[in-house]
Amino acid sequence: MYFEEFNIGMSADIEPVTIEKDKMIAFAKEYDNIPLHTDEEYAKTTPFGQLIAPGVMSFLAVWANYLKIDFFADELIAGKSTKMEWFKPVFAGDVLTGKATITDLAVRNERNGKVELTIDVYNQNGDLVITDVTESVVKRRTN
């Protein structure tokens, strides 16, 4: 979509994804190798009582399903920034769903604009577990 086609409040639901334990541990061992994500015996001694999924991995699992919707498509020029906030832990077996919403728009110049996309991620109990706010540079229509 071109910048001019976006409206604040536009939204779409993101298909559910299940966090698989083996993928969770493999991701953690490569990218976030701390005992809370990789050592089950250690994790039992924490307030969580079990392994928790790396936050970035949990979000990326939902992001992969967002890309099936992909508001920006071919009009995306580049990502500008992202800010992720974690509210509750994600565990192996959790089913995450998301809601993608356009939350801000700003013209940058005659060629492009900035689109802010907020994705709220919920677990199977309806608890908000992650919010990500991504700013992207998107093409404007040229006359």
Image (tube, rainbow, N blue to C red):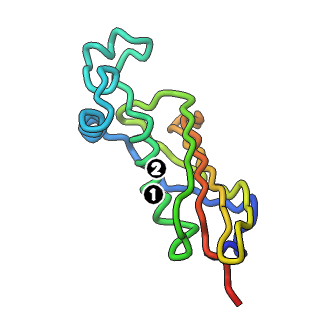
- Where is mark 2, residue-wise? 62
Identity of the residue furthest to the bottom in this view: 143
- Give the SS element for disc 1: helix
Residue 50 falls in which quadrant of the image?
Answer: top left
> Does 82 appear above or below 93?
below
Residue 7 falls in which quadrant of the image?
Answer: bottom right
Q: CA distance from mark 2 to mark 1?
A: 5 Å
> Does 11 appear above or below 82?
below
Give the camera-side residue of 98 and 32.
32
The answer to whether the residue labelled 2 contacts the one labelled 1, judged by CB atoms less than 8 Å apart, is yes
Image quadrant containing the C terminus? bottom right
Image quadrant containing the N terminus? bottom right
- Where is mark 1, residue-wise? 65
Q: Residue at x 26, y 19 (%)?
A: 40
| Relative image position of residue 91 (x, y in whole percent) | 40, 30
Q: How many marks?
A: 2
Identity of the residue furthest to the front in this view: 109
| Relative image position of residue 67 (x, y in whole percent) | 47, 62
Characterize the local packing of mark 2: few (<14), some (14-19) or many (20 or more) Cα atoms within 10 angstroms.
many
